[in-house]
Image: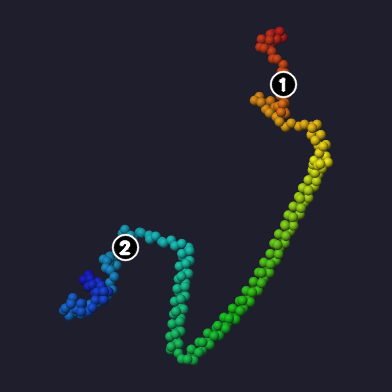
């Protein structure tokens, strides 16, 4: 415990950049150099040779639930980190090998890199040709499908136009037939005479009893006369007479 406390004091003094003269004043007697170790904290813990506590023996730690998007992002970042570290290691290996080899080996590696680059360019051109063929086929199929779609739209538009034209012609024929009964300056006198001879009165009314009155000055229809009903005494006397 005293060792740890001394180390903490020494570390704090080193953090504040205390000069060595001040340290000599604190310890005037010559002593061996203390063991300067970085002790961030001290906390009494259970010794590692003791078993697990009974209260924690059957405790099952909860597994953290990571969302799928976060898991994908973490795997992507880890892969990028591993790739970068692998490339750095390979680069350092090449630099170390270049320092330990001669100029001929370096020139040979450069030549290999140039050949590798040429091979990559050729492969890229092959891939571009294949992709261009696939693209042309896809564009040709899209063009055929587009032409069929446009043709269907044209046929549907023509059909709609023909139906609309037929409806317009039918309307024109109906109006022509109805125009024969229109009042014109030539037959206005005849129309006036017919209207005066055939007066139509559309007025009507209904009273509280449900009687219907036609015309402005109409009268209710005549009521049907119902035969008088015999009284109870008359019915009784008729029954006695029949007996």
Q: Residue at x 46, y 70 (%)?
A: 77
Numbered disc 2: secondary structure: loop
Outermost left residue: 29
Q: Quadrant of residue 157?
A: bottom right
Residue at the image point whose x is 72% and y is 21% from the top: 223
The CA distance from mark 2 to mark 1 is 113 Å
Eyeballing the image, is 125 above or below 202? below
- Helix, strand or loop at mark 1: loop
- Note whether 216 is above or below 126 in the view shown: above
Residue at position x 79%, y 34% in the image: 195
Q: Nearer the viewer, residue 77 or 154?
A: 154
Residue 4: % across, % down: 24, 71
Q: Which mark is residue 177?
A: none
**In the visual, does 231 lie left or right of 117?**
right
Quarter of the rendering occupied by the C terminus = top right
Q: Report x, y in % for residue 46.
A: 28, 65
To which residue does mark 2 refer? Answer: 52
Residue at point 30%, 64% (across, down): 51
Image quadrant assignment for residue 181: top right
Residue 7 in sight in this render: no
Which one is closest to the eye, mark 2 or mark 1?
1
- Binning the other alpha carbons within 10 Å of mark 1 as few (below 14), some (14 to 19) or many (20 upward) gives few
Who is closer to the viewer here, 187 or 132? 187
Sequence order check: which comes first, mark 2 or mark 1? Answer: 2
Along the horizontal axis of the image, is 196 left or right of 18? right
User: Taking the image as drawn, is residue 73 in sight?
Assistant: yes
Q: Residue 132's quadrant in the figure?
A: bottom right
Q: How is the image coloured?
A: rainbow
Number of callouts: 2
Residue 234, how many percent across, how many down? 68, 10
| Label 2: how many Cα within 10 Å (few below 14, some 14–19, many 20+) | few
Q: Which mark is residue 223?
A: 1
């Amino acid at each position: 415990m005293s060792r740890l406390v001394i180390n903490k004091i020494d570390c704090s003094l080193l953090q504040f950049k205390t000069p060595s003269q001040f340290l000599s004043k604190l310890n005037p007697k010559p002593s061996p150099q203390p063991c300067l170790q970085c002790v961030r904290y001290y906390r009494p813990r259970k010794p590692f040779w003791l078993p697990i506590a009974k209260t924690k023996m059957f405790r099952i730690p909860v597994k953290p639930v990571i969302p799928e998007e976060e898991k994908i992002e973490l795997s992507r970042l880890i892969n990028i980190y591993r790739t970068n570290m692998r490339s750095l290691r390979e680069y350092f290996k090449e630099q170390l090998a270049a320092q330990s080899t001669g100029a001929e080996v370096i020139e040979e590696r450069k030549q290999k890199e140039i050949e590798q680059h040429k091979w990559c360019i050729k492969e890229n051109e092959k891939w571009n040709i294949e992709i261009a063929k696939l693209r042309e086929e896809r564009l040709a199929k899209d063009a055929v499908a587009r032409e069929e779609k446009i043709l269907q739209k044209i046929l549907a538009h023509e059909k709609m136009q023909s139906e609309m034209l037929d409806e317009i012609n039918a309307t024109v024929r109906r109006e022509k037939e109805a125009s024969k009964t229109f009042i014109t300056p030539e037959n206005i006198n005849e129309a006036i005479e017919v209207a005066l001879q055939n007066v139509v009165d559309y007025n009507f009314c209904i009273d509280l009893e449900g009687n219907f009155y036609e015309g402005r000055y109409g009268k209710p229809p005549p009521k049907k006369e119902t035969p008088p009903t015999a009284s109870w005494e008359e019915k009784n006397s008729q029954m006695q007479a029949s007996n």
